[in-house]
Image (tube, rainbow, N blue to C red):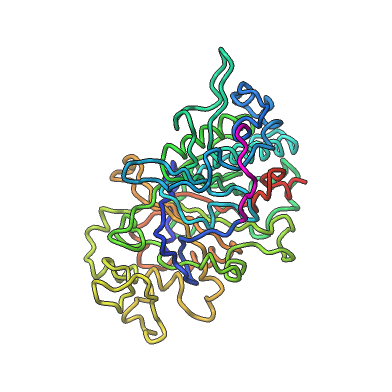
Amino acid sequence: MLSYAGIYPIRVCLSKSATAQTRHTTGARSGRETMTDKRPPTPEDGWNDGGCPASFLARRSFLQGTVAGLAGAAGASLLGNDTALADTASGTASTRAIPFHGYYQAGIATPPQTIGSFVSFDVTASGRKELQDLFRTLTARARILTAGGTPPKAPPGSAPPDNGILGRDVVPDDLTVTVALGATLFDGRYGLGARKPVQLVTMKAFLHDDLDPALSQGDLLVQLCAGHRDTTVHALLDLLAHTGGAMRPRWRIDCQRNPPRPVGIPRDWFGFKDGITNPDTTDTTQMHQQVWVQPHTAEPAWAAGGTYQALRIVHFNIEKWQKVPLAQQERIFGRRKASGAPIYAVSKNASDLLDPIYTNDPQGLFTALDSHVRLANPQTPQTASTSAILRRSYDYDRTLDVRGGLDLGHAFCCFQRELNTYITMQNRLEGEALVPYISPRGGGYFFALPGVRDDKDYYARGLLT
């Protein structure tokens, strides 16, 4: 589990192989656990709520009234939920809609899509009522965008209600919209301090971090994932058009997930398979223990069904890495580069599903004591409670680095029931052999909200009411 860090425009969620990892350690790509919206499709309300005029939806600021008619918009796709998946060879977008409603948000335990975008916002709402309207609007737009359909026609002389990037009909394309809150939202502006998640804090720099304040923190994080880049851009523009009066973009990073080469887990820009071990997202007990906040705990009641999200943007020093001999690269990671298997597996066809074993290697003769995988999960009784996170990370490729060279890196993203789990793990990684080849430059800690249960619910309702 590379604890990389990177921060800026995103394009990320790559589709994961059907063979889900069912591990109980660090890292993360996996299936999703969410309630399905059973309501039948309604031909008109997916985009205009049946009676909402197109000019109403076209207004850019939610302060001009975009909330009122949106809250009841249908979540079912106008195009149906059971059509074929994307034909990636031809670039055709998927017509399958990932259910929006559920006890948990989609985009957390959901199998990662190919493309993603993390966008951090500063909330500019003037008060508690305006903040509530913001979350209602975000919910309504996310419900509509993830369902897909045909936007309403604009009256003569009016701007179109949709930006048209996806054409006449908006295909769902496996879009998920995941909303999380930063610690700064719980300052004195909205009177929410007493209801803040217990462990939610702003991210402080670790020993080897080089954090840029302009690429760090935020009141609110929106994670957009889909099958194609135009889908996430379309969704972001739509959200900005309807909420511009209440939140302002702070930073953004676009990412991707590379295809498996040749099979199994995708590789990062270092050429190693990334995120091999992960909790089994189909195991309810395991997910409750490691990922989802439970009721009747120290956390506020409204937080049940949510989870802590850590996001770190990590620059890779590719030029320096490429000069390192293969054997040394494998020692640094603690796995074979070609196969992804543990160091003890010498066959080029060894499976990346094999687990590292340290009980017979106390001196680190096979898997070095300062290797990435061993420090992330030392497999000791003392570290067992701080070695399991749900990883959902991506790779970014930005323009040339202003410091010189390529700006390639990792948008490290993980979810866990307790934020301290990640922080403790990252503290262990301060001594890893990978440190000279990475530069964490941004990100933040957030609390991913519980899911939107039905068409009467909205993001953060439990917090705000």
The answer to whether residue 225 is seen in the rendering is no
Of 370 and 221, which appears nearest the observer? Answer: 221
Q: Which residues are magenta?
A: 35-44
Q: Is residue 315 left or right of residue 251?
A: left
Q: Is residue 43 above or below residue 301?
A: above
The image quadrant where one finds the N terminus is: bottom left
Q: Is residue 286 left or right of residue 165?
A: right
Of 252 and 439, which appears nearest the observer? Answer: 252
Percent x, y of residue 229:
41, 40
Magenta highlight on residue 42? yes
Q: Is residue 33 above or below residue 149?
A: below
The answer to whether residue 373 is seen in the rendering is yes
Q: Which of the 4 quarters of the picture holds residue 2?
A: bottom left
Percent x, y of residue 106:
56, 52
Q: Is residue 110 above or below residue 382?
A: above
Which residue is located at x 33 percent, y 43 percent? 403
Of 156 and 292, which appears nearest the observer? Answer: 156
Task: Single out the residue that lies furthest toward the right.
Answer: 465
Total count of labels: 0
Which residue is located at x 39 percent, y 68 percent? 372
Of 105 and 362, which appears nearest the observer? Answer: 105
Percent x, y of residue 170:
49, 34
Q: Is residue 317 left or right of residue 211?
A: left
Provide the major secondary structure of the magenta segment. loop
Which residue is located at x 44 percent, y 55 percent? 393
Q: Is residue 104 left or right of residue 462?
A: left
Magenta highlight on residue 75? no
Task: Single out the residue that lies furthest toward the bottom.
Answer: 360
Percent x, y of residue 111:
47, 56
